[in-house]
Amino acid sequence: MKLIKNIYPLLVLGIVALTGTAVTSCNDSMHEESYYTFTGEYLSDYLQSHEDYSAFAEIVKRSANSTRGVDIMDLVSCYGQFTCFAPTNEAVNKYLSDNGYVSVSDIPYDVCDTIARTHMFNGVVYTTNDLLGRSSIGYVNMNDRDLALKDTIVTDDEGGNEASLFVNRTALMIMKQSNDSVQNGIVHSLDAVLSSSSATVADLMGENPNITLFNDAMEVTGLADEIRNHVEDYSWNPELFEDKLVYSGAQWDYCNVPLKKKYGYTVFACPDKVLANRYGITNMQGLYDYGREIYGGPDVDVTDPNQADFLKSEASPLRKLIAYNMMPRKMSYEHMTTICTIETSYVNPTEWYPTSMPLSTMKIERLTVSRYLGTGETRGIVCLNRGDFSRGYRDISGIHVDKNIEGDYDNNGTNGYYFTTDGLADFGEITKRDVFNTRLRFDLYDLFPECANNSNKGDAMRSDQTEGGDATNIPYPKAPCYWFPKGYLENVKVNDDGIFLYQGCRNTYWSYEGDEFNLAGQSYDFTFNLPSVPSGTYQIRLGFCLMASRGICQFYVDGVPEGIPFDMRDGNSSARTGWFDLENNNYSKDEMEAAKKNMHNLGWYHGPRSIFNFGATGIKDGTNASHLRFSTHDNTLRYVIATKYLDENVQHTIRIKSVWAVGDVVAMVDYLELVPKSVYGVEGEGKAEDDW
């Protein structure tokens, strides 16, 4: 994806320098061949001046008369960042014929509005190079929907082959007419009009005969209805709140109130053939019995109508089995993990998410490190509950997620996605013993599904806005910064004075995965749920950046204060924390271990060696060694909040309360680590905790 500043024409190919800051994309650089032509026109001019898109242009113009009352043609007639998938006149004529319309003027205004929005993306510019190889765009269009993508090979008029794309399974991108740059975006040509289904994830699953048994289990356990009944909280009214200008540490951030409160789901569905071949499961009773092996529970006949209510209850092993393979968050294949700030040649990007099974967590890992690949595995694939290969658990290969659905079936519903897998993930004793016997690192974003469901994180590492120094010179006016009013996030309690602020992804920040949460307000008081982990003793660590603009706070775990009030400011940090240069090659092995032990005894750990930023001078192209690792700076650290026994059957909480917050200071809550004693308690050789 290309994020391009919207003030100048898109003439510069490669890295675009703007006010001293360069722009990034998911593939880091824009090559000259990425563009077909440069027209010097705005998108509105282009659509209306190119005869082959005249019918689509008429559809876009008619959208102004819809009940939404937004003139989309006028919107794309000025500066901005747009990607338009424009159907040709031939494609529109076929649409008219298929739907019983004689001409575009017969299409209702609201339908025109939906068509126009389905084909337009606002705020991003995608070249074909950005789209090839993806399973979906991973960013919502102006109709709040993602578009599915599938690579294909087409034969041109001369008999040559070229890569192309199917968009939403039905429309082929006409490559020779795509990548046309306009002053405010880019245009791709399609041979069909895109449809916009309103089906939920559960409805789409029911259309796929390859997952019949899993889908039936979704119905029997009531989970399918849960998905159908949760699309959006229409009682949410953002007009009751105002956007805020908040000083969040180094600059002022303009923080929006989320416009919507949508629900979302991601389901990992095991196909019938896998259930039969891998587990010998061919019917619902077999699936129930397998769940009983994992989670325990009574021996019941699933065909007995008297058991219908039990099968829907949280005590049902069948519901547990299916619910664990379902998450209350919407994620495309590409967005199950992120590469932002992560050294992907050294560590596999990994997230730990709460699932729809109460008090459970799932590990999602993308394979990027060559030495950690198993037999037949390729870089880039996603695995569920894979063992930590770096700690020797190479026999726990996990469950592999298919990038594309077999057959011509839609997996992108109005409230999420489903994906097929090569097995059933579980939260059983073997998983708890082997998969979770490692350091668990949680980006705080992972704990709040509402963020993913309402596109708060965005799609990129970005540094395309101008810094500012005070409230009159607002930096990042279009950056994805939000504040969440009380009640918006389900598992967060906040007092009236507190402001829960989210800063979106920028890989120039000293922030894990480029984003961070800050707690603002003169007397903020926040409580949120800790992730659920297997029973045992854990170090609970906070990863953050010491800065002069931080305050002093008190931590509580399960309502009990932990230690003395904690000062997040960076004064004399090395003496206070025991920090030393971890990359200093002059240390002997014994000296290094002694220095680490001293630092750990003081309650501190270096920032991870696997996490980096690019510094404040702007985004680099990723081809040089400009990464600034967190381990090399004395302010990007991990602090041990507490060492506690965590019971897997209890919902534990962490509370952060202001003790001193004078002068717009904030508490930074970037990421948490839950580290079992089997990891943090090991010194020296063996399976001691690494620095990554």
Image (cartoon, rainbow, N blue to C red):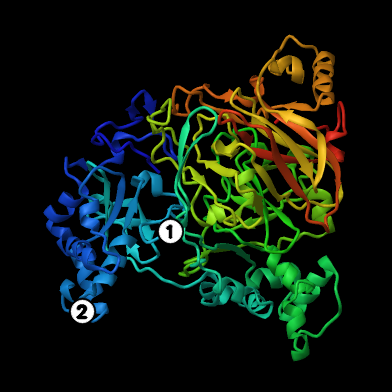
Front residue of 662 and 609: 662
Give how far across and how far down residue 130 sits, in percent.
39, 45
Q: Amino acid at mark 1?
A: Asp
Whether residue 376 is visible here, answered yes or no, is no
Q: How many marks?
A: 2
Can you identify the residue that label 1 sits on? 146
Whether residue 504 is visible here, answered yes or no, is yes
Q: Is residue 242 left or right of residue 263?
A: left
Can you identify the residue that label 2 sits on? 101
Give how far across and how far down residue 632 sits, in percent.
64, 20
Quarter of the image for residue 514 reads top right
Pointer 1 local density, CA inside 10 Å: few below 14, some 14–19, many at least 20: many
Disc ID at residue 691: none
Tell me the SS state at disc 1.
Answer: loop
- The Cα–Cα distance between marks 2 and 1, rounded to whole angstroms, is 27 Å
Quadrant of the image containing the C terminus: top right
Give how far across and how far down residue 144 sits, in percent.
41, 60
Front residue of 156 and 65: 65
Quarter of the image for residue 64 reads bottom left
When the figure is inspected, residue 237 is found, relative to residue 32, above or below; the finding is below
The structure residue drawn at horizontal position 77% and vertical position 76%, both measured from the top left corner, is 288
Quadrant of the image containing the N terminus: top left
Pointer 2 local density, CA inside 10 Å: few below 14, some 14–19, many at least 20: some
Q: Amino acid at mark 2?
A: Tyr
Q: Is residue 47 left or right of residue 548?
A: left
Give how far across and how far down residue 316 sits, in percent.
78, 74
